[in-house]
Amino acid sequence: MLQDDDGQILDAHSISAGLDYPGIGPEHSWLNDSGRVEYVSVRDDEALDSFQLCSRLEGIIPALEPSHALAHVGKIAPKLPARSSCWS
Amino acid sequence: MSRGTTSGRIEARFAALREEGRAAFVPFIMAADPDYPTSSEILKGLPAAGADLIEIGVMYSDPMADGPAIQAAGLRAKAGGARLSRTLEMVRDFRQNDDTTPIILMGYYNPIYIYGVEKFLDDARAAGVDGLIVVDLPPEEDSELCLPALDAGMHFIRLATPTTDDDRIPAVLANTSGFVYYVAVAGITGTKSADTSTIHAAVTRLKSHTDLPVAVGFGIKTPDQARNVAEVADAAVVGSAIVQTIADNLTPDGNATPELVEKVLDFTRQLSGGVQGASRQAAE
């Protein structure tokens, strides 16, 4: 929760309406705390760049929420072996 | 379930009013609206202006039950430096000169949760707070704050509404203490008003389930409305109309005008006059 030390909720900001929220749900919180999922952040401009890239290269116009995920794919894909799967 | 010894102020006040045969007048102000010195001065003047009990709003950023007037009061309070610890300080200061008027804090859970429940209950009791109304804690969450509060001798006053049906009432009343607060309208504070016969029926229904006093609030804005409610309930609560009087007596840049405190107390006197002028149709 984005909050101050008096328990007042702080204003959130995201270019994506669906992410413009000051809290994290209990399922994500649990997955983070148990180490099952690693959470990373992506800036507004990175998400917009990925939105453009995916639209241009794939002809698929993504929502701004998954555009954040695509931006992170762009960061980690070059470090992965040529033929790899996230399940392996 | 263990219940701690309460301060006794709420019980004593309702018992005295029963002797007098009249209902209580309960004004609401938001702590730090528009700043702590001004709201503290208003608070100290309320008993002499006819307040039988006092509700003090604890500012919260996400006030789900508050209408526009009290939301605006909350924003002014935020600008005025509202913090839960300073609000307890204001109550402690009030108690230097008044050890009988019950003080009820009304707000939301997160500031208390962040403060720490046990520490909050200790500090609130020590400051002279008699009861809590925490809008976003239904009976299903009683283990969070309600039960520790009752253990610590702090009254926990629950809200019942027009949609609280006979199946739900026992759950709402089970751990309620001090009095029951009947929200007269299905909605937020300070908007529409319920008619007296509807309120009378609701209070009668609640009283068939509990011996606790029933206070009625939400939508009472004038001395006439306060009198009508006082004829059928044990207490009439006025909030939005009082904080609107504060809003109406600010300078353009949001500071208190020199006459603000007296204007608020004048209006409070009119409201309490309405309550005291009620001829009671005891709803037993």
Image (tube, coloured by chain):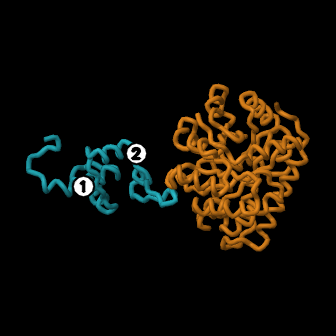
Q: Does the residue at mark 2 contact the one at mark 1 (Cβ under 8 Å)? A: no
Q: Residue beneath label 1, please?
A: A72
Where in the figure is residue B250, as x and y percent of width and height? 72, 69
| Residue in view at x 81 percent, y 67 percent | B262
Residue B178 visible in the picture: yes
Q: Earlier in the sequence, mark 2 or mark 1?
A: 2
Residue at 31% x, 47% y: name it. A33
Q: Give the residue type at disc 2.
A: Gly
- Label 2 sits on residue: A25
Q: Nearer the viewer, residue B42 or A15?
A: B42
Q: Secondary structure at mark 1?
A: helix
State which quadrant residue B30 falls in: bottom right
Task: Decide if residue B103 is on the left or right side of residue B110.
Answer: right
Answer few, some or many: residues within 10 Å of disc 2's Cα (few below 14, many 20 plus, some between 14 and 19).
few
Instruction: Write down the chain letter for disc 1.
Output: A
Q: Which chain is cyan?
A: A
Which tint was used for chain B?
orange
Q: Amino acid at mark 1?
A: His
